[in-house]
Amino acid sequence: MLNKFLSSIGIGHVKVDTIVHTTEISPGDHIKGDVVLKGGMADQPVNEVQLLLLLKYEQDKQDSDFSYHEKDLNTIILDSIGTIKAGEEKRIPFEFPTNARHPKTTDTEQTILRTTVDIPQAVDPTDEDSIFVR
């Protein structure tokens, strides 16, 4: 019972690591990899894993105090994951298409693949990976 409570507040909870097979792509290529989930101290049900491809760019805006902004480009949902048992490791393969007009990586524009694991009534683990678009 204590382990389940600790997992729900983020202590000893499920961890996520997205392994991208090729971190350098051309516009229109597919990003391929595996989402690796590692169970924590207690069994936890997983609603879904969300892979979000986003563009992080630098731009000064009058209505913002921040110079870096994010624009969502595409999302893939991996569901039917089930429950991650304590100490278990699950690998979920994915293939993420990119647009033929995808912006190239520059000093002011970066492509990021953000992974979020949706776990009911718990802290949602996340991971981010940079993708270099040539």
Image: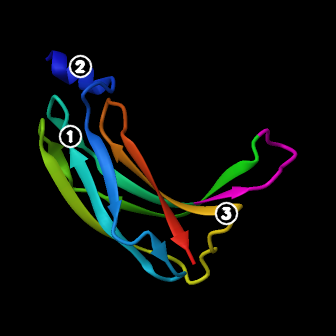
Q: Which of the two discs, 3 and 1, sits closer to the camera?
A: 3
- Seen in the picture, residue 117 relative to 79 is either above or below; the reply is above
The answer to whether the residues at label 2 and label 1 have Cβ atoms under 8 Å apart is no
Q: Which residue is mark 3?
A: 109
* Residue 25 falls left or right of residue 91: right
Q: Residues within 10 Å of mark 3 (few under 14, many from 20)?
A: some
Q: Amino acid at mark 2?
A: Phe
Whether residue 117 is in magenta: the answer is: no
Q: Sequence-wise, which precedes: disc 3 or disc 1? A: 1
Q: Amino acid at mark 1?
A: Pro
Magenta residues span: 55-65
Q: Which residue is mark 1?
A: 45
Q: Rounded to the nearest whole Å, what is the CA distance between mark 2 and mark 1?
A: 14 Å
**Residue with the most extreme top position:** 2
Residue 93, image x, y percentages: 25, 66
Residue 68, image x, y percentages: 70, 49
Q: Sequence-wise, which precedes: disc 3 or disc 2? A: 2
Who is closer to the viewer here, 121 or 35?
A: 35
* Residue 121 falls left or right of residue 67: left
Q: Which residue is mark 2?
A: 5
- Seen in the picture, residue 46 relative to 71 is either above or below; the reply is above
